[in-house]
Image (spheres, grey):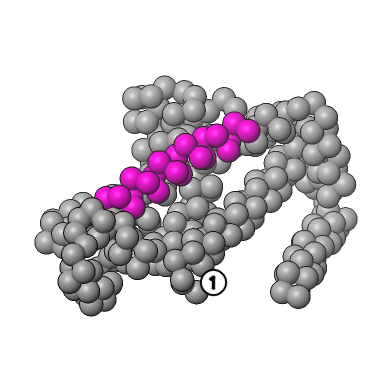
Amino acid sequence: MKRLISLRNTVVSVTAVILIWQLLFHFSHYDKALFPSPKMAFDALLEMTRNGQLLESIKTSLYRFAAGYLSAVAAAVLLGLILGRLPKLFQFINPAVQLLRPISPTAWMPFIVLLFGIGDIPAVVIIFIAAFFPVLLSTVAAVGNIDPIYIKVSRNYGIRQPALTWKVIFPAAFPQIASGIHLALGTAWIFLVAGEMVGAQSGLGYQIIDARNNIRADILLATILVIGIIGIFLDGLLRLIENRILAAWGGRV
């Protein structure tokens, strides 16, 4: 029943957006080459699907996203588990983290391109930076918020490191860590597109720039829609994985 309600809400929401878009197109005075209708964008989507351009761009972007996001999550969770158990050390590291965290990853683009050139790596690095700090801070906070009774009981049963971290601390902290991982997903997907718009010659972000330069607003809007749809799919996939992990560890789903 919940799935049917969710599907209904999605259909209603998407339909409303398309209707508003169509109304704006109908009553606007802009040239259709600059502001296309939903049908024109859909036709452009079919065109890119037939010539293979869309599939190739999606594959390239997902490869970069997976490389940057997964490596950031792994590094941030591992470091966060360590720093969460060493609060005095984190007191010295935290000011540097708070200094770097608010800086937009794209601000580092000139130096990233200088170091790594043009291609896959700049986009991967941008995604890594975007995802790393939310996951790191949520992991450190999650470990710090664990009830000390878990640690005491574990030690009474003779559980020592590294089993203590992976069998007790990580499962207990996972619900809060999952929130940071989920937040980082959206941030990383946004900055994937931004990174490809500046430091790549392929992918969905580059496709937007290429469409703009060729005055193909229909392709541009079609690509934006695809980016949004993939973002929703990734969010749902991550939520499913989180729920299964929580269910396996006896958490709430």
Dominant secondary-structure state across the stretch colored magenta: helix
Query: Is residue 144 in the magenta section?
Result: no
Q: In this image, 7 relative to 191: left or right? A: right
Q: Which percent across, then down, holds residue 122? A: 43, 31
Q: Which percent across, then down, holds residue 91? A: 15, 60
Q: How many numbered marks, from 0 up?
A: 1
Q: From which residue to which does the magenta span run?
A: 59-79
Mark 1 is surrounded, within 10 Å at the Cα level, by few (under 14), some (14 to 19) or many (20 or more) other residues, namely few
Q: Quadrant of residue 216?
A: top right
On the rendered image, what quadrant is the N terminus found in? bottom right
Q: In this image, 209 relative to 22: left or right? A: left
Element class at badge 1: loop
Q: In this image, 102 relative to 229: left or right? A: left
Can residue 103 be seen at all in this image of the molecule?
A: no
- Identify the residue at horizontal 83%, vertical 53% (top origin): 25
Query: Is residue 61 in the magenta section?
Result: yes
Above or below — where is 150 with respect to 71?
Answer: below
Above or below — where is 143 with respect to 228?
Answer: below
Q: Which percent across, then down, holds residue 155? A: 18, 68
Of the residues shown, which amino acid type is indicated by label 1? Val
Q: Quadrant of residue 51?
A: top right
Considering depth in this image, is 188 or 235 the residue closer to the camera? 235
Q: What residue does disc 1 label?
A: 253
Q: Which percent across, then down, holds residue 238? A: 55, 55
Above or below — where is 19 with respect to 217?
Answer: below
- Identify the residue at horizontal 87%, vertical 47% (top origin): 39
On the rendered image, what quadrant is the C terminus found in? bottom right
- Identify the residue at horizontal 55%, vertical 34% (top origin): 63
Above or below — where is 139 with respect to 78?
Answer: below
Considering depth in this image, is 10 or 84 the residue closer to the camera? 84
